[in-house]
Structures are given as C-alpha cells and as structure tokens.
Image: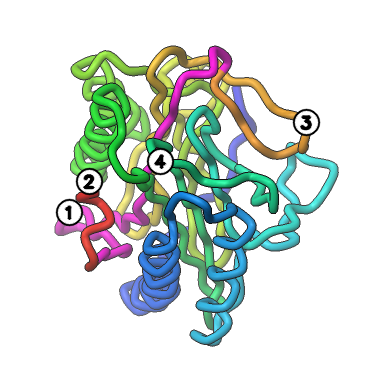
Amino acid sequence: MAEKTQVELYSLKELDMIKRACDVVVEVLETVAEYVKPGVSTFELDLIARDVVKKRGARPAFLNYRPPFSKVSYPAALCVSVNSAVVHGLPKKDQIIKEGDIVSLDFGAILDGYAGDSAITVPVGKIDPDKERLLRATKEALEEAVKACVPGNFLSDITKAIKRVADKYGVYPVKNLGGHGIGRKVHEPPFVPNHMEDFKHERDMKLRAGMVLAIEPMLALGTSEITHNGDQWTVLTADGSPAAHYEYVVAITKDGPRVLTQFTKGVFDG
C-alpha cells in the first residue's frame, strides 16, 4: 500500500490559472504537430517546442525535471515517443521520423506559478490499420475516462473506463504508468493508474470537487508490459509493438468534469 499523500483542492480562480498554463501547452503541441513529417528529427521538434513556450512567457515543465524514479534530470523540453516508445521519449538528432510512424508528443508548461500538461499521438502520413485502431482506442479511452471524473467516483473508476475501451478494441493498457494530479506543480498526488493491477500497490481514493488530474491513457497493440532503452528515459513496450498516448488535464467540479486542455486544430482527429 502506498503511503498516504495530501491531494490539493483548487479554487475556481486557481482552475482558471491552471487553464492558462494548459492553453500554452495546447499551443505548443498544435504547433509541433504541424512539423511531424518524414525527414524531421525528434530533436528538431524539441527546439520548436522551446521556441513557442518562450514566446508565450512560460517555461517548459519537463526541462531539467528529475522525477523520483531517475538519478538524472530530463534534458529536453518535449517528450517524443515514436512507435514502440510509450512515453518519456528523449528527442535525438539521429532519430528521423518516417512515413507510417506514430509519434506521441508530451509537453508541460509552467505559467505564473501553475502547471499544464498534455499529450497527443500524431500519425505520419498513411498508417497501417492496426495503428489506426490503436489511436482510436486511446482517444476513446481518454474520452470515457474523463466522463468518470465526477465527485463521488473513485480513481479506479477512471482506470476501469480505460480498461473497458482497451478490451473493446483488443489493445492493452500499459502497467506501471498513468496520470497524476497537477496544479502548482506538474506532477502532484494522486497517481492515476492506467492498469488495474497497479492498484495492488497504489491507494484508491474518492474523487472530490477541486481535484485536478492529468488523465493520460497509454495503450499498446501487443502487451501491457514495458521495458526501457539505454538512454535512461525512453519507455518501450516489452514486445516492440506500437503504443499511443493522449492526455487531458481535467478539473473535477460539482457540475462534472471540466477539461482544461482545449485543442482547436483537430490534432485529436488525425
């Protein structure tokens, strides 16, 4: 059982501040998505993200961030995870995007003391039917998970929603990864597991108005198991099958879920 941790409850005014940070994240991701094309390196995408966030007067939340699981700080602003990379993909000059790839972009920003965070998966040109099915499943899992974000429900209701959609499409929620609280910091309690088995060592809890959660289903075509490559960051599917990742920041209010990451350019429709 995980140690009990304090979960912040945010006021309506603070939710507006978090949304401002989320607006920056959305602008960065929508801009970077336009450059996800064959021949572009993942390193170039990171440079674009840094430029956009700087122009908005915010700072990248992931740059030099060191989470508890790592001995080193993350050296980039943007996570770029290609094909079998699930999350935390480290941008590299020699990683060149190709036709048929799927590219997950994950970005966080800090603006005026509040954080935003979101992720999208971008198809590169024509992708195969299995990858199309995976993207549909992951987007639908996010939509259903958001519906579970109401006071009186539990964290596990979010995870169950992800599982139902994954089962429907014959894909797999990855283990040991998930969403999180967000507000003054980009990563706050609670952890929101993507896989039901993770509740064996993570505490379930009732959802309350004022909680703000980054909901981020990560689904894979072939397995729930993960591994790591040699760069100390990139998380891969254990069987090498493709993975997809979508993320919203959602405020839990007495009137239901309020999505604070509002995309406008159809990046969720690609």
Q: Nearer the viewer, residue 103 or 10?
A: 103
Kindly indicate whether the residue at mark 4 contacts the one at mark 3 (C-beta within 8 angstroms).
Answer: no
* For marks 2 and 1 on the same chain, the one whose residue lies earlier in the sequence: 2
Is residue 152 shown to the viewer in this render? Answer: no
| Residue 168 lies within the magenta run | no
Q: Which residue corresponds to mark 4? A: 99
**Magenta segment:** 238-263
Decide if residue 71 is on the left or right side of residue 128: right
* For marks 1 and 3 on the same chain, the one whose residue lies earlier in the sequence: 3
Disc 1 marks a residue whose amino acid type is Gly
Kindly indicate whether the residue at mark 1 contacts the one at mark 2 (C-beta within 8 angstroms).
Answer: yes
Q: Which residue corresponds to mark 2? A: 150
In x, y percent, where is residue 244?
40, 35
Local crowd size for mark 3, using a 10 Å CA cut-off: few (<14), some (14–19), many (≥20): few
Q: Which residue corresponds to mark 3? A: 230
Find numbered disc 4 in the image and state the secondary structure of the residue it sits on.
loop
Local crowd size for mark 1, using a 10 Å CA cut-off: few (<14), some (14–19), many (≥20): some
Q: Which residue corresponds to mark 1? A: 256
Q: Distance between the residues labelled 3 and 2?
A: 40 Å
Question: Residue at point 22% right, 54% down?
Answer: 257
Find numbered disc 2 in the image and state the secondary structure of the residue it sits on.
loop
